[in-house]
């Protein structure tokens, strides 16, 4: 059976995923500080909205007001979709304190309570009719208790995927750390996209690697990536060649470029995706 794919519409990302993210996949978006994880998660949600796919953004690290502001920083008018009931922020940051929280519909009072977290998220997804979800960051849920990280991620995966959604889980790792967020988590998720920032000869290079993605072919090289005023742009037809002391951007073989282009053109993406929650099927 041909896999149905969710286009991220992030320039270059669908190409290196040979057509997009397989529907209902839970993707770990992993990387060190300042590598662009939050921006990529927001871009995934916003691009969906412009194509008629509703979205929910769960914030654990940033005040909801600042979340909305950073969408606008890239010219993404998220407020319009929020007003139309097509987008919602789930506030797992303020714990319900402050004047903003008083006006919010979706607030998680205690982030350590996985049951409460899941229930708030479930009602947000259902009421918004979301098919895209971002959690920023999922690491915050188990920072002090790594032993239960896998259990938390599995609970959220069952819930989100079961409701027909495709999701980005932001995962924070330290500078220089090779992993993506812990062994339990890395195996539990369906996909891992890793963002990096490296310094060579006094110059910083951004790059992206798709480490795994169930049910699809992936590009097997590190691609250069830029953060622009319009968001993230991946140089999908180039790769970042890192030797001991330097980094060079090289073109990919033409055959691979053509195959990626073709995969995106032929990807099975239904015009209007109708989400039927599994529980109600
Ligand atoms: N318009 C822009 N042009 C270029 N770079 C930008 C622009 N806006 C933001 N950035 C860069 O994006 C980076 C932040 O990206 P983001 O917040 O997604 O990082 P992150 O990976 O989520 O980091 P953290 O885990 O520390 O929160 C900043 O370091 C900033 O330099």
Image (tube, grey):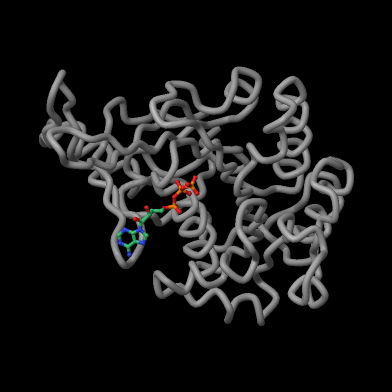
Residue 77 against residue 179 in the figure, above or below: below
Is 146 left, or right, of 68 in this rendering?
right
Residue 81 against residue 138 in the figure, above or below: below
Name the residue at 49% across, 36% down: 30
Query: Which of the image's four quarters has the N terminus?
Result: top right
Is 31 left, or right, of 142 in this rendering?
left
Query: Residue 88 falls in which quadrant of the image?
Result: bottom right
Is 108 left, or right, of 269 in this rendering?
right
Name the residue at 65% across, 66% down: 64
Name the residue at 51% across, 52% down: 41
Residue 22 against residue 54 in the figure, above or below: above
Q: Residue 172, position in %: x, y?
A: 53, 37
Q: Residue 242, position in %: x, y?
A: 18, 25
Considering depth in this image, is 268 or 181 the residue closer to the camera?
181
Query: Residue 32 falls in which quadrant of the image?
Result: top left
Query: Residue 262 falls in which quadrant of the image?
Result: top left
Q: Residue 238, position in %: x, y?
A: 17, 38
């Amino acid at each position: 059976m041909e896999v149905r794919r969710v286009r991220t519409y992030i320039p270059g990302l669908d190409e290196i995923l040979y057509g997009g993210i397989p529907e209902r996949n839970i993707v770990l978006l992993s990387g060190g500080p300042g590598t662009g994880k939050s921006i990529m998660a927001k871009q995934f949600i916003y691009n969906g909205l412009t194509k008629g796919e509703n979205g929910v953004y769960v914030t654990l690290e940033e005040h909801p007001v600042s979340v909305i502001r950073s969408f606008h920083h890239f010219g993404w008018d998220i407020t319009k979709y929020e007003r139309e009931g097509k987008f919602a922020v789930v506030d797992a940051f303020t714990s319900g304190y402050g004047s903003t929280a008083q006006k919010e519909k979706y607030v998680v009072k205690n982030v350590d309570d996985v049951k409460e977290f899941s229930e708030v998220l479930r009602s947000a997804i259902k009421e918004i009719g979301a098919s895209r979800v971002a959690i920023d960051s999922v690491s915050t849920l188990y920072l002090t208790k790594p032993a239960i990280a896998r259990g938390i991620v599995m609970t959220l995966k069952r819930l989100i995927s079961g409701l027909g959604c495709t999701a980005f889980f932001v995962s924070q790792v330290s500078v220089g750390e090779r992993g993506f967020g812990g062994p339990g988590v890395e195996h539990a998720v369906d996909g891992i996209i890793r963002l990096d920032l490296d310094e060579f000869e006094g110059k910083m290079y951004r790059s992206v690697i798709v480490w795994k993605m169930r049910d699809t072919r992936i590009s097997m090289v590190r691609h250069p990536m830029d953060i622009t005023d319009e968001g993230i742009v991946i140089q999908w037809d180039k790769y970042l060649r890192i030797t001991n002391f330097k980094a060079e951007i090289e073109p990919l073989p033409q055959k691979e470029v053509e195959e990626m282009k073709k995969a995106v053109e032929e990807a099975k993406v239904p015009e209007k995706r109708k989400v039927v929650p599994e529980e109600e099927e």
